[in-house]
């Protein structure tokens, strides 16, 4: 066993083998590593979570839910406003196109009538156009992301 | 052959839903599923984020943000959650929490104040003797060195030391092999030992 393998074994979940113990007994560098690491890890560790902290954690689910709803609410409202504006402008377009179609067109100089056709887009969208639901899933643009980016949560 | 059901038996016919099912239930309007998800993982997230926080309030706020961002990420991929194919919510959460924590201490002023000094100052009823001051200084140096570890080493170290997780679970959450997780931890410890020793901290061997 070399020093690298000993250090890995010392830090793993499993108990040390006899071979590892024998190595440390004969290697001063590994013996120093063995003696120093527990103190190092103790210094690095944070104090246990206190009862006060646990009590506060009990309110976390409700706090997160409220924050989630608050974050969703303005976005839904904004989407509804945009949807209504789109619907209104489309409705106005359809109405004006229908009025133009029903009204007699101006006579041409030669006496022929000019026929005005509805634009294809308006004709297709005409009767059954519905407002999208407030949560219509249009935020699924990132569906190809199957794992959070390494920078998820990063501040740009 | 039918796929195995995703419910885990606990006792006398009682069952526990996995995270993916709870995420799916939440997006179908089950608020209790949301609460259960948060309760299930809040302690780990909080423990991870304490290292990057100035005080418990800070850690609590960061934990809230971590869950919020995890649900937002889950919402973006909710069709996969509906399919119930091992939706990796806990792994998302850990990744997001660690990134949030890192950004939280990005401000150089915060690096000088690990949370622990505040927590321990509040809990220590007696004035510090010389030995206690030395110990506190060693802790401060060591914890600052943890924050300076490379990202992967810091992630593994946090899950292992703060989260108290076995290497197999650390590896699963980070999407790496168990051997790789052990190696990162080993490098992290060696680096801490060098840094703290170079700074004149640490305990006598």
Image (cartoon, coloured by chain):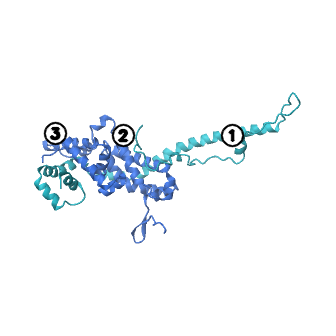
- The quadrant in which the C terminus of chain A is found is top left
Quarter assignment of residue A79: top right
Does A48 sit left or right of A95 as displayed? left
* Near-viewer residue (B201 or B77): B77
Q: Tell me where residue A69 appears, x and y as whole percent.
A: 49, 48
Residues tagged by mark 2 and mark 3 found on one chain of the structure: yes
* Near-viewer residue (B11 or A156): A156
Q: Which mark is residue A90?
A: 1
Element marked by disc 3: loop
Q: CA distance from mark 1 to mark 2?
A: 45 Å
- Residue B123 visible to an observer of this rendering: no
Identified at 68% across, 38% down, the residue is: A89
Check whether the beta carbons of the residues at disc 1 and disc 2 lie within 8 A of each other.
Answer: no
Above-or-below relation of A112 to B152: above
- Residue B47 visible to an observer of this rendering: yes
Q: Colour of chain A?
A: cyan
Above-or-below relation of B2 to A5: below
Q: CA distance from mark 2 to mark 3?
A: 28 Å
Identified at 60% across, 40% down, the residue is: A82
Q: Which residue is mark 3?
A: B200
Q: Colour of chain B?
A: blue
Q: Which residue is mark 2?
A: B103
Q: Tell me where residue B49 appears, x and y as whole percent.
A: 33, 46
């Amino acid at each position: 066993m070399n020093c690298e393998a000993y250090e890995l074994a010392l830090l793993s979940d499993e108990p040390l083998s006899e071979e590892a113990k024998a190595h440390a007994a004969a290697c001063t560098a590994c013996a120093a590593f063995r003696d120093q690491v527990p103190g190092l890890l103790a210094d690095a560790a944070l104090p246990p979570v206190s009862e006060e902290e646990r009590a506060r954690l009990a309110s976390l689910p409700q706090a997160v839910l409220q924050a989630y709803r608050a974050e969703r609410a303005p976005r839904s409202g904004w989407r509804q406003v945009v949807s209504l504006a789109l619907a209104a402008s489309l409705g106005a377009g359809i109405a004006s196109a229908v009025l133009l179609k029903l009204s007699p067109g101006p006579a041409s100089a030669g006496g022929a009538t000019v026929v005005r056709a509805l634009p294809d887009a308006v004709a297709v969208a005409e009767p059954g156009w519905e407002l999208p639901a407030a949560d219509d899933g249009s935020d699924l643009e990132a569906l190809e992301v199957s794992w959070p980016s390494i920078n998820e949560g990063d501040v740009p | 052959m039918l796929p195995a059901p995703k419910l885990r038996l606990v006792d006398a016919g009682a069952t526990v839903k996995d995270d993916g099912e709870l995420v799916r239930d939440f997006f179908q309007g089950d608020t209790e599923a949301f609460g259960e998800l948060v309760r299930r993982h809040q302690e780990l997230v909080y423990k991870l984020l304490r290292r990057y926080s100035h005080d418990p309030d800070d850690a609590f706020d960061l934990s809230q943000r971590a869950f919020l961002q995890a649900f937002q990420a889950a919402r973006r991929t909710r069709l996969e959650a509906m399919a119930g194919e091992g939706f990796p919510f806990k792994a998302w959460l850990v990744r997001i929490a660690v990134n949030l924590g890192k950004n939280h201490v990005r401000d150089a002023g915060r690096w000088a104040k690990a949370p622990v000094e505040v927590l321990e100052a509040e809990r220590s009823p007696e004035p510090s003797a010389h030995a206690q001051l030395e110990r506190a200084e060693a802790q401060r140096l060591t914890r600052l060195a943890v924050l300076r570890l490379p990202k992967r080493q810091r992630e593994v170290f946090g899950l292992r030391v703060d989260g108290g997780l076995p290497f197999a679970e650390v590896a699963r959450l980070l999407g790496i092999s168990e051997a790789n997780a052990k190696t990162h931890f080993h490098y992290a410890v060696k680096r801490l030992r060098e840094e703290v020793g170079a700074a004149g901290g640490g305990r006598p061997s």
